[in-house]
Image (tube, helix red, strand yellow):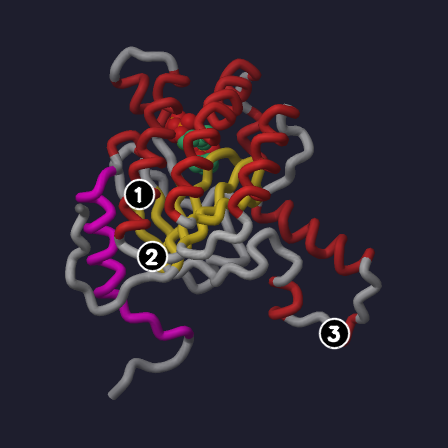
Amino acid sequence: MTTLPNLKHLPQHVAIIMDGNGRWAKQRGLPRLAGHKKGVNTAQKVVEIFFEYKIPHLTLYAFSTENWNRPKREIDGIFKILEERLEEGIKFAQENGIRIRHLGKPDGLPLRLQEKVKQALELTKNNSRMSVSLAFNYGGRDEIVEAARSLILGCISPQDVNEKLFSQYLYTADTPDPDLVIRTGGEMRLSNFLIWQSAYAEIYFTPVLWPDFAKKEIDKALIIYSQRQRRFGSLPPE
Ligand code: IPE
Ligand code: IPE
Ligand code: MG
């Protein structure tokens, strides 16, 4: 049983940029794909911990629209690992009432992965204890452009367009904005991740490489989050 530190504020939605798989492998003289394999194990463990912590929304960034710039071998390998591991993910989700969502475009993904994703979304669509959103073939700018395109196609009149309506056209419609964005691997940037939704998220960077990310690191991030003061442009209470 995983115990949660006793904290004043807990985030309702945590979104994680899972970075550092390649460096983790390189440090061990292994091929980059070994890092991605290990990274998916970490992702599974992290989902289990957040589930036990009863944090209702978790988003994991697994492949960006810019990651298409990598060698084909690595891209094919990542998608194969995702496809294989989704099967286990669906099983865990079904046993625990977890809804799986996909953020990103299905187009361009290998057909078998598209099928697996469809199956995951369909099988888990009525689960409501927790939502786990997997962002792959995802880019924040692409998401915003697609939303604008849908608004235009839907002939929405300009005076009806506001932030609330626009949010409904994003992949994250029906999910609250992330309270906390964590990036592992030491880089301090968002790399096109949830750029609309993270407008007021607390951001936490850690040098720990994703395959090494574990309960201790989650607890550290949650403790730091609970000590932050969120003002949303207002003034701190007197
Ligand atoms: C993150 O790890 C996973 C993906 C972007 C697919 P990286 O593959 O970016 O690992 P580093 O940053 O090269 O170590
Ligand atoms: C961001 O990591 C994307 C994911 C973790 C899926 P990258 O390794 O692709 O980001 P950059 O290239 O360092 O910005
Ligand atoms: Mg990286």
Residue 183 percent coordinates (x, y): 35, 44
Residue at the image position 54 percent from the left and 57 percent from the top: 196
Question: Marks 2 and 1, how far apart in space?
Answer: 11 Å
Q: Residues within 10 Å of mark 1 (few under 14, many from 20)?
A: some
Tell me, yes or no, whether the two marked residues, 2 and 3, touch with CB atoms within 8 Å: no
Earlier-in-chain disc, 1 versus 3: 1
Residue 197 percent coordinates (x, y): 51, 58
Counting labels gives 3
Earlier-in-chain disc, 2 versus 1: 1
The quadrant of the picture showing ligand 2 is: top left
Say whether residue 121 is left or right of residue 154: left
Q: Which residue is mark 1?
A: 48
Say whether residue 27 is left or right of residue 161: left
Q: Is residue 44 above or below residue 36?
A: below
Whether residue 173 is in magenta: the answer is no
Residue at the image position 55 percent from the left and 49 percent from the top: 125
- Which residue range is magenta in the image? 214-232
Element under disc 3: helix
Is the residue marked 2 within 8 Å of ligand 2, measured from its CB? no
Q: Nearer the viewer, mark 2 or mark 3?
A: 2
Q: Is residue 192 above or below residue 137?
A: below
Which amino acid type corresponds to the residue marked 3 in the rendered image? Asp
Residue at the image position 39 percent from the left and 38 percent from the top: 92
Which amino acid type corresponds to the residue marked 2 in the rendered image? Ile
The label number, if any, that marks residue 55 in the structure image: 2
